[in-house]
Structure formats: structure tokens, C-alpha cells
Image (cartoon, coloured by chain):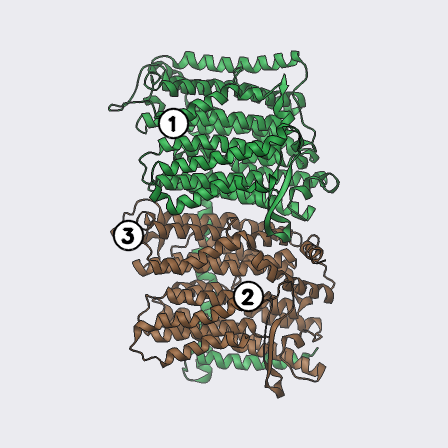
Chain colours: A green, B brown
Amino acid sequence: MSQFLWIIIALPLASAVFLHFAGRRIGEPRAGYLATLSVAGSFALALGAALPFFQGESHGVTVNIWEWMPAIGAALEINWDPLAALMTLIITGVGALIHLYAIGYMHGEARFTRFFVYLNLFVASMLTLVLAGNFAMLFMGWELVGLCSFLLISFWSTRPSANAAGKKAFVVNRIGDFGFLVGLMLIFATFSTLSYAGIFERAEEVLSPGMATAIGLLILIGAAGKSAQIPLYVWLPDAMEGPTPVSALIHAATMVTAGVYVIARSAVIFEISPIAGPIVATVGAATALWAATIALAQKDIKRVLAYSTISQLGYMFLAVGAAGHVAGVFHLMTHAFFKALLFLGAGSVIHGMADEQNMEKMGGLRKAMPITAVTMLIGTIAISGIPPLAGFWSKDEILGVAFSRGGWFWVLWIVGLVTALITAFYMTRQFVLVFLGEPRWTEGVHPHESPRTMTLPLIALAGLSIVGGLLNTPFRTALEHFLEPSFELVALTHPPEGLGMFVLLAGLSTLAGLAGAGAAFLTYNRPAELWGRFEAAFGRTWTLWSEGYRVDDLYWATLVKPGLRAAEAAAFRFDTPIIDGAVNGAGRLVRAAASKGRGLQTGMVRSYGALFAAGTVAVIGWIIWRGA
Amino acid sequence: MLTALILLPAIGAVLIALVPGRRRELFLPLGVTMSIGPLALAAFVFTSFVTGEPGFQMVEREVWYEPWGLSWYLGIDGISLPLVALTALLVPIVLAASTAITHRLKEFVMYTLLLEAGLIGVFLALDLFLFFVFFEAILIPMYFIIGIWGGERRIYAAIKFFLYTAFGSALMLAAIIGLAVLSSRQTGVPSFAYTDLLDVSLNPTTARWLFGAFALAFAIKVPMFPLHTWLPDAHVEAPTAGSVLLAAVLLKLGTYGLVRFNLGLFPQASVDFVPVMAVLAVIGIVYGAVVAIVQPDLKKLVAYSSVSHLGFIVLGTFALTSGGLVGGLVQNINHGITTGALFLLVGMIYDRRHTKKIADFGGLAQVMPIFAGLFLFTTFASIGLPGLNGFIGEFMVLIGSFPSLPIYTIIAASGVVLAAIYLLWAYERAFTGVPDKPENQALLDLNLREKLVLAPLVILMLLLGLYPKVLLDRVQPSAEAILDRIEATTNYVVPEPGRLEHVLLMEEGE
């Protein structure tokens, strides 16, 4: 079986290649169905290949596909262990649903098949990332998902804002990659290989705490780029320029979790360092709170979700930073369910509202779009951490992990709790603004429920958002048991033991969720003037939130603009006048000397020739004279 | 066989000369045909090359002028083999891409074939004097290609190119002759043969001066900062064929020479000069990329990106680790393929619009989607996207150089961010958005000929990105041999894990 694992990657890749060349002939919607089937096929295969893990019969295998850069221990090889399997199932499972949804969403789009080429290519790249058996191949997947993200964000390439957003995403990610790359250099210099097997099993004997800290923090830089954490999160809100299925699949459910995955994968390294983990957790908690406050004040339905994604990724960082890797991956999974659901729901709304994204112009949509409304409500409850939906279990486990680490982590735990409250508030605000109250639609808009290809994935994801959390409860830790072989080299942090502690902690976080949701409901389920007054009461703070603390302006003023100025200075005030000027000056000088000395203008080339000949003879003489 | 490889294109040039000048329509097809021969032969040499063998293969040696010890001495190893193959591959491609040339077409085809003969010769020559002859001979056809078929300031650019290079090579000639004289004094037998000159014993000072003379000539060719300003001018003015061969092959004379002659002949001086070369390489990487960001002209942008990319090669070379050296040698080829393709692409849009200014374009993806797609593909290969060829060399250089030059390598790694900035920004401005300029609205997408011209390069970008072993297996043993020699003749020890691959290789061999 294991020698066929490569087919999991090859299926969507083959579909992408096929559609690239033959997609136009196949046409809409068949190209979309083919793309969907290829991803579903990978899901089925992965499910079959994961059976031994469910039965506890295997701890994982590594299968070599072919030599790539043997010199640095980098083959194209598949590492199939429970963590990889879980990631694969999430990517292909959620991926297939989103592909299906996109058939409806992208209906009538001129570049319909092109979209599925990119989407398939993305799935293949993401699978490369999680199935890699070494850091070089992981980096390949890492960069390729960045490419797909770029292509899909700027999919509507006649829109200047889409192109700028695509470029911004790629460049900001590359800044993170720079750190990651340096981390890989350190890993290679320490272990003489980039292969997981050669690194993780020897880490304890080879790696000093200092080196582990350095590597860990460099990996964090890369992870912060891909997973949109402070200070590199700025590309993700702009990435909403892409079509909504892209936002759901890439910028919520899968690609942005790559940073969480890579930290969990490198758990051994983080364990050896005394501070790398706590720093990861701190960055995560800070990002969670920071982005949640921004999400509070967004008017654009997708931007709320974008900042919410950043915030939720922060939770995952908090978890893996606290060595609660199972908790982090658990939240990664439940978040993939409910955030994909929320994005697809938002897409359904945008679709039904003729491309309107401003929530102030929505309202009362529950009658026109009942399926979207109900599923979105489920997603909202799930993300708000209200039991027994999926988000409650995973978020609670993260908070429990932070709590049981104690010390500084208590601060992070409080931050997490506060963020939970804010999360429930802004999500409920969104739901109320969109679906409840009176219509505030622009004239001529006729909202309608979306077609079956779109509602079917919504219903499926809603189902997963309800029951997905039951995979890992304090009463039945199935996921932890499943993932155990992948983390056998590390000591995982668990939430505090005992029913009493669980009830206390869960009670607190549920209370936070209910308080946030309740407050938002009471505030926004009223006429627009009233909640408008509520927002105005915050004054400039609200404006600051709605503008994302103006971090983009800050980066522009402190980095982009000075950088451009410096480049211009280097090119036009240094390279051309000074370096090239010196060359041309020397040329003129020699020419002048030559023509004076010989009294006639023989043409530049010849006079140089004579000069060189003389010089050459002199130098030869000197060498011979000096001898050996 | 190697002699035939040099003579075939030269004979092709002579045959073209015999065709009456009025049969203009024949010249390009004939030229392409003539260059298929060397390509086939090069392919044969590439496949029959014995992998895992570090030394020179297919050696040919005929006495040329005995009193001075000159010989027609040719051989090929893993360092020169890929460059020869690249040259043979690109010449038919650039000829097929040169349909825009109408003026003095016959001469153009002849010069291109002569250039090919010279380039192949320079990589095969194992007699230093012969090497020098080829090295200089290349200048002449290239000078004319820029000077006759170039843009507005072609004369200025051609002379600048010629003088700059000639200046460097004059010093190198002195060094070659000096070295040969010392050799004949020590052995009593005059010789310019590379294999004989390896054994000359030099006092450290002389070795450093000789190293300097060679290094200067090659640094100009690479070009290394601050000797790079001839390159943007030459590229901007040269016709497409000239730009492609210049970037893809002529620049590699520099990096090839640094490996073959500087590392090969002067091991101790090479070790001594590591700081200088590494600093200049890193400056080149960062500086070239920064300056590229704001270039208004596409060709100039690509030219400065070459300065940056070639910096990686020099850094890898002087890291004196196998990862760095092998990565650098692989990057030689990969840069040739991607940058060659970029210049071809720029040429194709220039043929349509007669401008290379980024600001004159905009929205091209709407009117020329295939062209835009291929441009983006090549751009990502150049940025070093894993899975495509550009990544392999760059990644190996970075990973491989770090153990010996950690700080420089970290600074060099910032080049990956800068490359994304300058290339994607250029792409954004030229290709995306709405084509609002009327001149751009009716442009035709690539025709079949243009697609065929690009196809081999695109295939290679994928192939070498996913299966670089084709190159690595051939390059690595020869690169290891150079490091072996440095370790054997100096106190230098390649830092761990710089020689890991050596260990792996031996294990596999057993």
C-alpha cells in the first residue's frame, strides 16, 4: 500500500495538468467535477492508507519516490504518519467540498477551468508540504502553496487591487521564508541532513538549547509568514481579493495552517529550547487578541472572517507553543471545518447579493437564504466556543493547556479567554448584521439562495462543525490516541486533570462565549441608528480597529517607501553616476593620454591594444623576474 | 570528437558564407540546421560522459607549436560538460528566435555560429594558451553582434564590452605566460597544458598575484560588483540572440574560469582570497537585486538580476564546500536557462512593440495570455521556486555555503526576498490590469515558432527542477576533485558538514 502513497499527490496534480491543456475543451461544469473528483479520490486513498493508524497497527512509514538533491539529504520522499494522515484528510476532505462549491460559485466565469487548474495545483502542493519526509521537500510544498496563493489571489487580474494583494502575499511570505531558509541552513549545519528521520531522532543528543532556540525562532519567522501571525499577518486581509472559495480553502482551512503544522512537526526541536515555545505561544496569543479587536470593527463580511482567521491561528500557535501539539492540531481541524463553512457561507451571501460585501447593506437575509443562514449560525456558534459544537472542545483544550503550563502562560490563558469573548461578539455581530433585522439592501438587489453545489458543502461542513469536536473530548481522547505515534518523542502538555477543573475552565470559557454573543445580539439586533451609535461611542478607538491599527500605513512609511528610495538612490545616484561614471572616466582618461602620447588619433580600440600590449610585456617580465 | 564539436559550427559558418547573399530566406533555416549538428554531438557527449568520473574525458592532444609547448589540447569534465551542452542547445534556439533581423542577415548567422565555436572551444580547451585564444576570439563575433544589430547606443555598448573584457584578459594573458615560463623553468619542458601547470610550485606572493590577474579577468566577465556596469549597457543594446548568449553562456566564462583556473591552479591563494571574493559576491547579490527593483527597462532589470544571481554562484564557489561548489556549477546552467528564456521573452515583446520599457506595457496578460503565462513561469523559475530549476542551485549554494561562510550566506539569503520583489513588481506592471494603451490592445499572442523556441527551455526548467540528478551526477565528482586538491595542497579543511555528499557518494559506490 505504502508504495502507492504518491498517488495521493499525483491525482490532483494530474487533474491540474490535464485541465491546463484540455480544460477548455471539456468546459464548464465538467472541468469542475473532474477537479473535485480528483481531490475526493485522494481523500478516499488517504482514508484507506490511514486505516492502520486507526487500528493502531502502524507508527508510520517513509517511502522514497526519487532522488532529488542527494547531496543534502533531500529526496522526494513521503512521510506517512498519523499527523501527515490527519492533515491529508483535512486538506482533501475540506478541499473536495470546496471544489464542489466552486463549481457553483465560479459559474459563468470566463476562466472557469483555469480556476480549477490552480485549485488542483494548490491541493497537490499542500499535500506535498504535509507529506514531505524532509525539510527540503516541505519547503517545496511551502513555496508552491505560496505560488498558488499568489495566482488565486490575483485571479481577477484586471483588478489592480487583486494584483497588488497577490504580490504582497508572496513578498511578505518570502520575508518569512528568508527566516525559514536560514533555519534550514542551521539545521543542515547541525545535522548534516534535512531529512526528518536524521534530525528528530538525533536532536536530543546533537542539539544544544541555544541552537534549538535559534532554529525554533527561525522556523517561527517562516511560520508567522505563512500562518499570518504578528508581524507578518498583513497579507491575509488583502488576500480576500481572491474568489471566496480560495479564501475558504487556502486562506482559512489549509495553507495558513502550514505554520502550525511545521511547528508541530518540529516539536522535538522546540522541546529542547527553553524559550522558543513560550515565544511562539506569546506571538500566538498576542496575534489572537490583536486580530480579534480588528475583526470587531470590520464592515466587509470577508474581512471579518480574515481577521478572525488570523486570530484563530493565534490560538493554534498558543497551543503548539505550549507543547500542546494535539490541542493545536485539533483546533486546526475544527477551525478548518467551521471557518471553511463561514467563508463559504459568506460567499453564498455575496453570490446572492450580487457581489455586495458590505454588511451594513445586508440584513434580514434569513428568509431569502434559509440554508445559508442556518449553516452560518452553526458556524458562528462553533467558532464562539459554545458547547457542544466543535470549536468549544478544541478551544477549550488550548486554554486548558495554557492554564496547566502555569507561570507566564496564565497571562496567555487570560488573553485567550478575553479573545474568546471578543470572538463571540464579532461573530454574532456579523450574523445579526447579515441575517437578522430589517433589510438594508441597495436597490435592485434580489437575494436568493445559492444552487445545490454550493449549499451541499455548506450542509456537510455544518455537520462537521457540530460533531467534529467530539473526536477529542476530555472524556474520550480519540484524536490524541490517533496522533500519539507522531509525538512519541515529545512530552505533550495536557489540560489539567479531573472533572472539577474541566468544569471550572470550560465553564469560564463558555461564559466568555455566551457573554460575547449575548452582548452582540443585544447591541446589533436593533435598528441601525442604535448600533451605529454604539460603535460611534468608541470614537477613535473604533476607527483605529476598523483601519487595522493602520499597520499597513506604518509598514509603508517605515519599510516600503524608504526601501524604494534606497533602491532608487542605489540605481540612479550611485550605480549610474559613480560606478559607471568611474569606468567611463577612466576610458576617457586613457584615450586622452593615448592620443596625446602618440600624437594622433588612431581609434580607441587600437590605442588600448597598444597600451595593453606594453602592460602585458611588463607584467610578464615582472612575474619571471620574481620567479617561484 | 571534441574537435568536431568546435569545428562543426565553424564549418557551418563557412558554408553559410558560400550561400549567395540574395537568398535571404535561407539563412536562418540554414543556420538552425547547421547548429543542430553540434547540438546532436553535444547530446551524444553528454550521454556518453562517464558519470562518477572526476577527471577529464575524451581527451585529445596534438602538438601545435613545440618550441613554446603549445598544444591543441581538449578534454571535458563535469565542470565544462553542462556548459558545452547549454551552449549547443541555445544556439539553434536563438537563431530560430532571430526572425526580426533583416539587415545583413547572412553575417549575423555566421557570427552566431562562430561565436558558438569559440564558446565551445573555450570550455574544452585544456591548453591555457588555446583557452586564451578562444577567450579572445569570442569577443570579436560578440562585438559585431552588439555593434551591428544592436539598439541606439550599440557602438558605445559594444566598445565598452570589448574594452572592459580585453582589459581583463590582457592581465590574464600575462599571468598565463608567466605561469608557463615558470613551469618550463622548473621542469625544463615548455608547456601551457592545464594538467602540467597544476604542478608548478609557486611562492605565495606570486601565486596571489597570478590569482589576482585571473580573478580580475573573470570577475569582469561574471560580472562581479563593482565591475558590472558594462553588462546592463551590453544587454540593453544587444539584439535578442546576443543578450541570450551573453547572459546564458558568456557570463559563465567568468564563473567557469574562477573554478577551473583560480581554484584549480592556485589553491592556497584561493583560500586566502575567500573573504574578498565572498564580500564582493554578497554585495553583488544584494546590490544587483536592489538596483534591479527600480529599473524602468525590462532588459536592464534582467541584467541586474543576473548580477545578483551570479553572485550566488561566486559565493558558492568560494565557500569551498561541496554543496556550495556543486550548487554554483548547477546554478551556472539553471541561470543560463531561465535568464536565456527571459531575454527571449523580452525579445518577443520587443519585436511586437519596439520598446522594452515596463511603463509602456500594462495588461499584456489580457491580450497575450500564453506569453504572459510563460513569462510568469520563467519568472518563478528565476525567483527560485522549488520544483523548477532555479531553486536547486540557489538552495544548494545557501545550504552548502553556510557551514563555511555563515554570515555572508545569511545576507545572501535575503536575495530570495528581493528577487520576488523585483520580478513580481515588474510582472504586475507589465502584464496585469487592463491594457489601457491602444498600442497594446491588438498585440498577437505567441505564434507556433515562438512557442517551439521556448518549449525546450520550459521543459528543462521543469526537468532540472524535479530531477537535477542528471546534472548533479556529472558535476559533483569533478567539483569534489577540486576540493580534494585544495585540501591536499593547503591546510584548508572543508568544514563539516561541507563534505557530507562525498561520504554519501562513497557509501553508494561501495
Same chain letter for marks 3 and 2 = yes
Disc number lying in front (3 or 2): 2
Spatial distance from mark 3 to mark 1, Cα to Cα?
A: 39 Å
Between A624 and A283, the one lying in front of the other is: A283
Q: Is residue A405 left or right of residue A350?
A: right
* Quadrant of the rendered image containing residue B317: bottom right
Q: Amino acid at mark 1?
A: Met
* Residue B453 drawn at (x, y percent): 39, 61
Q: Is residue B263 above or below residue A540?
A: below
Residue occupied by mark 3: B440
Confirm whether residue A453 shows in the render: yes
* Residue A227 drawn at (x, y percent): 52, 34
- Secondary structure found at label 3: helix
Q: Which mark is residue A202?
A: none
For disc 3, the chain is B
Residue at (65, 14) in percent of width and height: A501
Q: Amino acid at mark 3?
A: Asn
* Residue A537 drawn at (x, y percent): 41, 17
Q: How many marks?
A: 3
Q: Residue furthest front?
A: A1
Residue at (53, 57) in percent of width and height: B284
Please rate how many residues cluster around mark 1, counting C-alpha atoms within 10 Å: few if below 14, some from 14 to 19, many from 20.
many
- Secondary structure found at label 1: helix
Spatial distance from mark 3 to mark 2, Cα to Cα?
A: 43 Å
* Quadrant of the rendered image containing residue B124: bottom right
Q: Which mark is residue A454?
A: 1
Residue occupied by mark 2: B46
Quadrant the N terminus of chain A occupies: top right
Q: Amino acid at mark 2?
A: Phe
Spatial distance from mark 2 to mark 1, Cα to Cα?
A: 54 Å
